[in-house]
């Protein structure tokens, strides 16, 4: 199976990293912005639409629905795929985005199909590039489509063969960012599984032969519907007429070339080909018709930072931070203060957000396949140690049988899915296994996301490989926002030693694989960096309002 071979070949080992150039070739650094020269540019309205929506509303479906139009679609994109800041150090200047990305390389491109048009989102300009007009738009009265693609070269430039994994994580983060921004606008968002990757490619116009001959390839990832109404008709929508309309359309614009030269990594193309979704005419979004109602209690502003030896509590006042503000302030921490402690109730509430009964989990149509192995360092009320958090309690016997026989499996308090495996100071182990990164040691906790792996790939098909990574990205996206809501900060960790992580847990074979690591704590800011807002017009607004 090519997906399994790709996965095995791109593991990091203590004695050998996955294959890459081994250095950064600055002369070929990819342009982070894809543009379609010659395509008409439609600027998106700039006004904030949902500033008063509380953070909890992202998960409980209570935000009032906005009418679908250019302004609200602009707000959706601004709060999911837009720019969050510009950073500068010396003469280097780079943009950060609302969605995180491994190495800030941003392989994910977003497309919108609405109003009879297929458009590419240009985040730097906050504008839509109109690629074509479709003569088949009948279904578009109650919603619109969002498509995602990956440009593997962007990640491969730095990470070589492991890059395809990062494209998939980033897609998962982007799905999560879009789903939660849609919730802020009172909308639902769900992937459309009946569309094959070939149909997504045709609709988004990312394989247009001679038009884009020079441009780096874009890999189809997924297509989703966004609607304030019923999902059912969208899930039943037959792709054929739209694909045919895209085939008839006159396409505008030429994709830009991102690097003057590139290094080929054939294993990435093989893995991408092998894991494409062939589509299913009969596939329905299981459970997606039930309205998302959050079972979790809001804990915005329940900030829980005890910083310093005196357990001085910082920011514990229950101020209510809006969803929009939190979404736009999300950042990755570069380092954590090793004295930060997370309040226990906030920790448990965070884990509950990973239960599949609320957004963003209604964006996908499968139950949890990814669970957490946690290295808990500093969470109030919890002994430091290795823990398991099962998003589906039914997995417990399987994990018990697969892991070290001397693990305790002590359920923690009333949290059904949380188990203490070993009470131990695991800071060094956490650091070592996450490619010797201090962020895995210095925060409240770090973790590995363990996915049910080879048996499901064999059962369902290689296309499933992408989906378990997307699920990991979704978990990461929720935890990034939860960290901000708690007054802390998080960082995704794509660099980890795969099999040493499995060894810590006593796992052998390929039934379970750790696909993504993650960390959270009290951030230490890098004061050498200059920060500017993501968009100049937002700077003016800030200046005017003081
Ligand atoms: C899939 C993924 C893997 C990442 N891996 C690491 C990592 O191993 N180490 C690290 O310090 N940061 C890691 N990051 C954080 C990125 O470097 C960060 O998202 C990026 O620089 C953009 O910054 P921002 O998140 O503040 O917008 C990762 C992020 C993602 C989404």
Image (cartoon, rainbow, N blue to C red):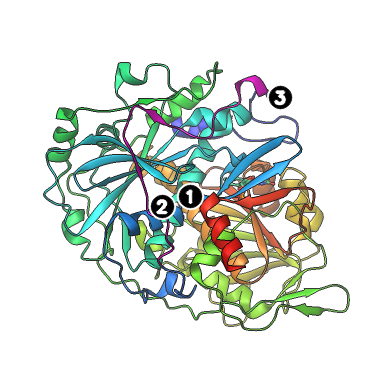
In the image, farthest residue toward the right: 309
- Image quadrant assignment for residue 348: bottom right
Q: Which mark is residue 82?
A: 1
Q: Quadrant of residue 313?
A: bottom right
Name the front one of labels 2 and 3. Answer: 2
Mark closest to the chain's N terminus, 2 or 3: 3
Which residue is the site of mark 3? 23
Q: Residues within 10 Å of mark 1 (few under 14, many from 20)?
A: many
> Is the stretch drawn in magenta largely helix, strand or loop?
loop
> Is residue 395 one of those drawn in magenta?
no
Pointer 1 or 2: first along the chain: 2
The Cα atoms of the two marked residues, 1 and 3, are separated by: 29 Å
Q: Quadrant of residue 305?
A: bottom right
Of the image marks 1 and 3, the number of the one nearer the N terminus: 3
Q: Position of residue 459 (x, y in %)?
A: 35, 44
Q: Is residue 68 left or right of residue 352?
A: left
**Residue 417 visible in the shown view:** no
Residue tagged by mark 2? 77
């Amino acid at each position: 199976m090519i997906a399994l071979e790709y996965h095995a070949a791109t593991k990091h080992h203590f004695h050998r990293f996955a294959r890459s150039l081994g250095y950064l070739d600055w002369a070929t650094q990819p342009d982070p912005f894809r543009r379609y020269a010659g395509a008409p540019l439609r600027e998106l309205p700039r006004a904030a639409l949902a500033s008063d929506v509380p953070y909890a509303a992202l998960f409980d479906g209570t935000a009032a629905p906005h009418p679908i139009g250019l302004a609200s679609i602009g707000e959706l994109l601004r709060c999911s795929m837009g720019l969050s800041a510009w950073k500068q150090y010396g003469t280097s200047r780079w943009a950060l985005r609302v969605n995180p990305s491994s190495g800030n390389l941003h392989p994910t491109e977003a497309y919108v199909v609405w109003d009879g048009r297929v458009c590419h989102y240009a985040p730097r300009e906050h504008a839509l590039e109109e690629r074509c007009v479709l003569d088949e738009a009948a279904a578009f009265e109650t919603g619109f489509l969002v498509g995602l693609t990956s440009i593997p070269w962007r990640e491969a430039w730095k990470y070589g063969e492991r890059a395809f994994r990062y494209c998939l994580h980033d897609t998962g983060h982007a799905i999560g960012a879009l789903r939660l921004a849609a919730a802020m606008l009172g909308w639902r968002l769900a992937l459309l599984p009946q569309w094959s990757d070939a149909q997504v490619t045709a609709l988004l116009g990312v394989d247009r032969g001679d038009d884009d001959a020079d441009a780096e390839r874009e890999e189809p990832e997924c297509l989703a519907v966004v609607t304030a109404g019923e999902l059912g008709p969208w899930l039943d929508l037959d792709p054929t007429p739209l694909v045919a309309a895209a085939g008839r359309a006159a396409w505008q614009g030429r994709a830009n070339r991102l690097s003057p030269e590139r290094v080929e990594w054939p294993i990435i193309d093989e893995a991408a080909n092998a894991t494409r979704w062939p589509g299913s005419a009969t596939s329905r979004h299981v459970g997606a018709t039930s309205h998302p109602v959050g079972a979790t209690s809001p804990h915005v502003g329940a900030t829980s930072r005890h910083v310093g030896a005196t357990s001085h509590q910082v920011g514990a006042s229950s101020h209510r931070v809006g969803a929009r503000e939190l979404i736009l302030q999300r950042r990755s921490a570069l380092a954590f203060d090793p004295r930060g402690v997370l309040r226990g109730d906030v920790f448990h509430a965070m884990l509950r957000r990973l239960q599949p009964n609320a957004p963003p989990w209604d964006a996908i149509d499968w139950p949890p396949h990814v669970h957490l192995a946690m290295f808990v360092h500093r969470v109030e009320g919890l002994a430091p140690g290795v823990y398991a958090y099962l998003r589906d309690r039914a997995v417990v016997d399987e994990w018990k049988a697969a892991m070290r026989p001397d693990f305790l499996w002590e359920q923690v308090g009333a949290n059904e899915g949380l188990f203490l495996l070993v009470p131990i100071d695991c800071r060094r182990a956490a650091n070592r296994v996450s490619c010797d990164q201090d962020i895995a040691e210095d925060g409240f906790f770090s973790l590995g996301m363990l996915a049910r792996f080879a048996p499901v790939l064999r059962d369902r098909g290689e296309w499933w490989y992408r989906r378990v990574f997307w699920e990991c990205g979704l978990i990461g996206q929720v935890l990034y926002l939860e960290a901000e809501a708690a007054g802390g900060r998080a960082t995704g960790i794509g660099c980890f030693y795969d099999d040493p992580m499995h060894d810590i847990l006593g796992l052998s074979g390929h039934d379970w694989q750790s696909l993504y690591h993650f960390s959270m704590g009290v951030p230490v800011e890098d004061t050498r960096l200059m920060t500017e807002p993501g968009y100049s017009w937002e700077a003016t607004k800030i200046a005017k309002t003081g």
